Amino acid sequence: MKESLSRGKKSIEVHIPINSIHLEGNLDIPEGARGIVVFVHGSGSSRHSPRNQYVAKEMQRGGLGTLLFDLLTVEEERVDMMTRHLRFDIDLLSKRLIDVTRWLLNRPDTKDLNIGYFGASTGAAAALMAAKEHADTVKAVVSRGGRPDLAETALMYVKAPTLLIVGGRDTQVIDMNQWALDRIVITEKELKIVPGATHLFEEPGTLEEVARLAGEWFKRYLSE
């Protein structure tokens, strides 16, 4: 474990024990943080996703803690690069997230923080499935270009206020998100469409808008 402190922020490389495996992660906790956002990356990605890292840094600037971690082990990632089946195993991914959330709840430096999930692509489905299981713990969920429709069985039970962010040019995913939004029935929910953005939000200013929208949502529900 490597730990550093800069300007009152704790930055730690962590090895998260899940049954017989360990998942690698990066934990950052600004001084005075009241909430932490757990990033759940999408298909074929990892904690090194430049998009998620950018959003995480913006969260930290806003006073929120962040955890970026790999949902798969190195060996599992190697297999998935060939088969592409683990990235769509929502049950596996959500169980990993559920266990990682328990790990956070047992750490002295994170157990008192309000928890939110930021899911991308298939990670959004895993986030919603885990939010159902941790209904009394997870205070907010944000999806970026996500596939919340893959969490169909959990949607009607999700209690965490949920924000779905989709690019305006990502028309098929807009439809999937609207379908999922209609099935979230017992909490506050919203669909935000970023004009001109495609699926990966690579257009100038679009990822910045994602970070702004997500940051406002998390500050609203994790700072209480």
Image: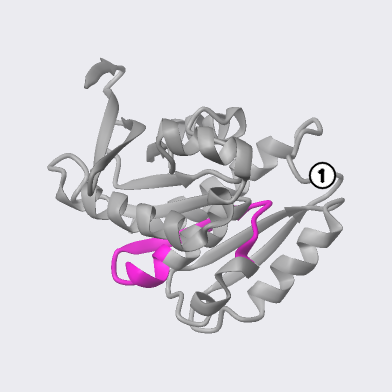
* Whole-percent x, y for residue 222 in the image: 37, 55
Residue at 50% across / 50% down in the picture? 118
The number of discs equals 1
Q: Residue at x 40, y 72 (%)?
A: 132
Is 146 within the magenta?
Answer: yes
Few, some or many residues within 10 Å of mark 1 (<14, 14–19, 20+): some
> At label 1, which amino acid type do we have?
Thr
Quick one: quadrant of the N terminus?
top left
53 relative position to 144: left or right = left
In the image, 201 versus 112, the foreground residue is: 201
In the image, residue 59 above or below residue 186: above
Q: Which residue corresponds to mark 1?
A: 198
Can residue 25 be seen here? The reply is yes
**Compared to 58, does 154 lie above or below?**
below
Residue displayed at 30% across by 40% down: 33
Looking at the image, can residue 63 be seen?
Answer: no
Whole-percent x and y of residue 124?
Answer: 56, 56
Residue 90 pos. (x, y %): 51, 60
Could you tell me which quadrant the C terminus lies in? bottom left
* The residue stretch that appears in magenta: 130-148
Q: Secondary structure at mark 1?
A: loop
Q: Is residue 215 left or right of residue 111?
A: right
Residue 87 percent location from the top left of the image:
56, 49
**In the image, 37: left or right of 173?**
left
Q: Residue furthest left?
A: 108
| Front position in the image: 130 or 54 | 130
